[in-house]
Amino acid sequence: MEFLKISSKSSPASIAGAIAGMVKDGVPVTMQCVGAGAVNQAIKAIAIARGFLIPTGFDISCAPVFSDIIINGEARTAIRLSVYVHHISAGAVQPEYGLTADDIQQVG
């Protein structure tokens, strides 16, 4: 499984563009982060990507899991964020009111 590897120096806007492109192309999105700074950049990217995607009829959410990985021969703990895609109806996109559970339909 491929991951978007996020660092504390990653640009949230660039990551968001990659997320939005992958979602539109139907490609599964999973991010791997090591350290609090990397997790921070990934979460900001998800928030920005939501802004790109909601007007197109998609919404996203994420679920974190811990993962033990090896970097340069050293054991580290990473957080992997799986991105879930939800289809929303055109009439539901009203930012001033937000979205409700009734507005979101699971895709895939």
Image (tube, helix red, strand yellow):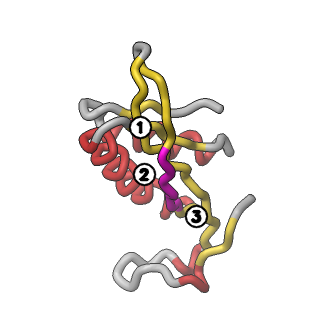
* Residue displayed at 42% across by 51% down: 49
Three-letter amino acid code at the position of disc 1: Thr
For mark 1, give the secondary structure: strand
From the image, tell me which residue sits under label 1. Answer: 77
* Residue displayed at 41% across by 44% down: 16
From the image, tell me which residue sits under label 3. Answer: 57
Q: Is residue 28 left or right of residue 42?
A: right
Three-letter amino acid code at the position of disc 3: Gly
Q: Nearer the viewer, residue 36 or 104?
A: 36
Measure how far apart labels 3 and 2 are at the Cα level. Answer: 13 Å
Residue 99 higher or lower than 21, as above or below: below
* Residue displayed at 24% across by 30% down: 9
Q: Quadrant where the C terminus lies? A: bottom right
Measure how far apart labels 1 and 2 are at the Cα level. Answer: 26 Å
Numbered badge on residue 49: 2
Can you tell which quarter of the image residue 11 is in? Answer: top left
Residue 72 higher or lower than 3, as above or below: above
Q: Main secondary structure of the magenta part?
A: strand
Which of the two discs, 3 and 2, sits closer to the camera?
Answer: 2
Give the x, y percent position of residue 56: 55, 59
Give the x, y percent position of residue 36: 27, 44
Q: Magenta residues, as a range?
A: 60-66
